[in-house]
Image (cartoon, helix red, strand yellow):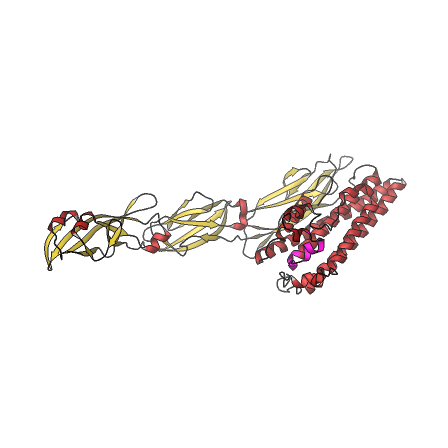
Amino acid sequence: MAGGGKETIRQQMINLMYLVLTAMLALQVNSTILDKFLFIDSTLQAAMQASIKVNQGQVQAVAKAAEENPEAKAKAALQKAQKARELTENMLKEIAEIRKEIIEKAGGGIDPETGRVKTPAEETKLEVLMVGPEGQKNGKGYELEKKLDNYVDELKKLVPSVAPQLVSLTQSNRENPVTKELYKNEPIELDKDWVQANFSHTPVAAALAVLSQRANEVLRYESIVLSELAKEASGVTLKFDVIQATYTAPTSVVANGMKYRAELFIFASASNVKPVIKVDGQPVKVEGGKGIYEVIASGGTPEGVIKKWKGEITIPKAGGDDTTFVVEGEYKVVRPVMQIQSKSVQALYEECGNEIQVLVPSLGDEYNPSFSGTGATFIPGKNRGDVIIVPRRGVNKVVMSVSSGGQLIGTQEFAVKKVPAASLALVVNGREVEKSITRGQLRSAQVVAKADPSFAEFLPKEANYRVQQYRVEVYRAGRPVANGNSLASVVGSVRPGDTVVIIVESVVRTNYRGAVIPASVRPKYLSVVIAG
């Protein structure tokens, strides 16, 4: 990863992916991590193809400079550039052959239906192939290690002045600054050589990503050499003789509400050239000679919809004429998946503040939701993605729509059920009285309404009940002997063996907003016997 000079956006992306790849190799493998390895491999493969075009353009530029410069050193520079291209092509071919062998022998080949490796999680076959049986160190990985080392040595011989920038491509964990820090407290991992570190206990998906990363480093080293040879051939920095246009994009798959971002740029651009860049006929922002194209993605489907764009890069030429280069790109828009989180996601309670969390992981920081729908009031919560749904009285269904960045993400349907009736209890000093009570206890007893346990668990802020009004009747031997509007009012009239009947006439519930709402109770009465 080391190198001199200012790195391109694409190279910074590749370096970042290398750091991520190194960290991921230390994790336990599951299907999610395997998908990330495959994504990194796919992205690095795309970056590699773009780098190949750049380097081919550099060789052509060296050839043009050598044609115009009669000095012998210019011709020598061209020969070295052609040699560097040959070395690189051979090295990339070696890596490609090993990739093919890994896919066939360890990965089970390519699934014709999905186009993906059949067994991306396979580790044992991969280790035997690349490291060797039982750690014998005679696998394909060690052959590749020698060839990578030889490749770097040959480049250094071609252009000794750039040798400090061409560090080994096969550093052990102890030599690599990243892994040296990562495994500083793990001596077994720290002592692994390059082959063991990258192919021992490693799934096929990760090994392919490692090879793609090395291929990109090979191309970067070639680019360093070719840039220096271009200076030798022309005596100045690279000139606009052979020019190509391209673009880079961090991802080609985006979801509704996300930004698709692409950078358009020309190869070997001079610092005094100020290009005019347009996409689909509209000017875009230009930063450091690169056009930044951003658009809010829309119209995605679960399978994905291909969106295409056309860019034009116009640069001035000597003599006052302009030259326009065309570059085309595409990306796929997929419909993001909503994740609904709630204690009771299947049904909502009528006229209650049902707290729901709606997550859309694929949108990342672009996620800025708004909520609407039918059959309820939708109140945004304190945190992004939180919403309180209050179904209206009498509805049996609520439909919620979720949007982000002006784009509909999806809808969710909920059933609506009534708030369950509360139950009654007689409480003395915090304990429920079931069948009998003493005359002394009757004086301090309280009549309370208890929420349905399931309702109280799902919506604790809604399950606050209070008995507002009740009446009391006292029976002795089956005949009424006293009555009142409170338990305390009949204490003086009761005797042991009497039955006290409490008839509840009004119960209320306080909701999450503090509003008092009439509530139902079943049954509406309870009775106890006065103990002797």
At 77% from the left and 47% from the top, the residue drawn is 222
Tell me if 140 is positioned left or right of 518 in this view.
Answer: right
**In this orientation, does residue 349 appear?**
no
Q: Position of residue 56 (x, y in %)?
A: 77, 48
Q: Is residue 306 magenta?
A: no
Front in this rendered view, residue 132 or 369: 132
Q: Is residue 426 above or below residue 293?
A: below
At 54% from the left and 56% from the top, the residue drawn is 302
Front in this rendered view, residue 263 or 175: 175
Q: Position of residue 82 (x, y in %)?
A: 83, 49
Tell me if 447 is positioned left or right of 182 in this view.
Answer: left
**In this orientation, does residue 64 appear?**
yes
| Number of numbered callouts drawn | 0
Q: Which residues are magenta?
A: 191-206
Front in this rendered view, residue 491 or 452: 491
Q: Position of residue 187 (x, y in %)?
A: 65, 51
Tell me if 46 is positioned left or right of 338 in this view.
Answer: right
Front in this rendered view, residue 216 or 64: 216
Specify the quadrant of the image occupied by residue 235: top right
Q: Quadrant of the C terminus?
A: bottom left
Q: Position of residue 166 (x, y in %)?
A: 76, 45
At 79% from the left and 37% from the top, the residue drawn is 237
Q: Quadrant of the N terminus?
A: top right
Q: Is residue 138 above or below residue 336?
A: below
